[in-house]
Image: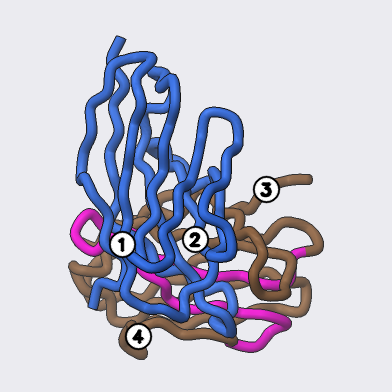
Chain colours: A brown, B blue
């Protein structure tokens, strides 16, 4: 099976802009989670989607949002970008029920100037 | 609030030696403890995981030791190899928490020849 794919891999944006990142989970997986990785804060959970519904949400401002489509692909959006949003954004997929292994994609490296 | 504390931040081990990374948690609702390995430019990959009903789990050269009463768990890498040089993250997940993982801050391991 193909792994988790994320597009784009690299992105440069300017403060105030918005950005949309995409994640395609492993075929058959219905749960998609998003994480932000920075040198200072480490890996932090953003949100999880399962069957097109947000199942969990981390402690991030409302500028961070996401959605999941019927084919389980997911997107996350960050509006009004701030310099501190520069990070590696990771997507992880799992079959769907809780307590299962999550498989991470390679991430999207976002740089906000 | 950091719920999973990881140490050391960095570790240098000679080839063939034992690498030991420790984690401590606060939330007693955590019931699943995975370790992830991350190479530069890649997403984290699951290495090994344990549930609190066992005190030790071994897979090849990797062993997790778990102490429920002390709320601590550790990763032991036996016969460490240069190819093991990577960043290691411990994590934890709660029952009913969906797939939300709370990560430790990471340990950068370097195995020298």
Tell me the residue that label 1 is attached to.
Answer: B24
- Closest to the observer, A73 or A3: A3
Q: Which mark is residue A63?
A: 4
Tell me the residue that label 3 is attached to.
Answer: A3
Would residue A94 be counted in the magenta stretch? Answer: no
Q: Chain of mark 3?
A: A
Q: Chain of mark 4?
A: A
Circle 3: element type: loop
Residue B17: percent from left, percent from top? 34, 20
Q: CA distance from mark 2 to mark 1?
A: 11 Å
Residue A49: percent from left, percent from top? 61, 79
Write down the quadrant of residue A62 in the picture.
Answer: bottom left
Tell me the residue that label 2 is attached to.
Answer: B33
Q: Which span is picked out in magenta?
A: A29-54
Q: Residue furthest top?
A: B113
Q: CA distance from mark 4 to mark 1?
A: 32 Å
Circle 4: element type: loop
Circle 2: element type: strand
Q: Are marks 4 and 3 in contact (CB under 8 Å)?
A: no
């Amino acid at each position: 099976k193909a792994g988790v794919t994320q597009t784009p891999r690299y992105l440069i944006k300017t403060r105030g802009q918005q950005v949309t990142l995409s994640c395609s989970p492993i075929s058959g997986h219905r749960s998609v989670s998003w994480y932000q990785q920075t040198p200072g804060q480490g890996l932090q959970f953003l949100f999880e989607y399962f069957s097109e519904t947000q199942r969990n949400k981390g402690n991030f401002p409302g500028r961070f949002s996401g959605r999941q489509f019927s084919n389980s692909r997911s997107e996350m959006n960050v509006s009004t970008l701030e310099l501190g949003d520069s990070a590696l954004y990771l997507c992880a997929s799992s079959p769907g029920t809780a307590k299962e292994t999550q498989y991470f994609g390679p991430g999207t490296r976002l740089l906000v100037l | 609030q950091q719920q999973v504390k990881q140490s050391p931040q960095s570790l240098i081990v000679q080839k063939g030696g034992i690498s030991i990374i420790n984690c401590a948690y606060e939330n007693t609702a955590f019931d699943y403890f995975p370790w992830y390995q991350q190479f530069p430019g890649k997403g984290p990959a699951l290495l090994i995981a344990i549930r609190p009903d066992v005190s030790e789990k071994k897979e090849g050269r990797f062993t997790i030791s778990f102490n429920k009463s002390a709320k601590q768990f550790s990763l032991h890498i036996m016969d460490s190899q240069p190819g093991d040089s990577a960043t290691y993250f411990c994590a934890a997940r709660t029952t009913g928490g969906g797939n939300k993982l709370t990560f430790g801050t990471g340990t950068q391991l370097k195995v020298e020849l």
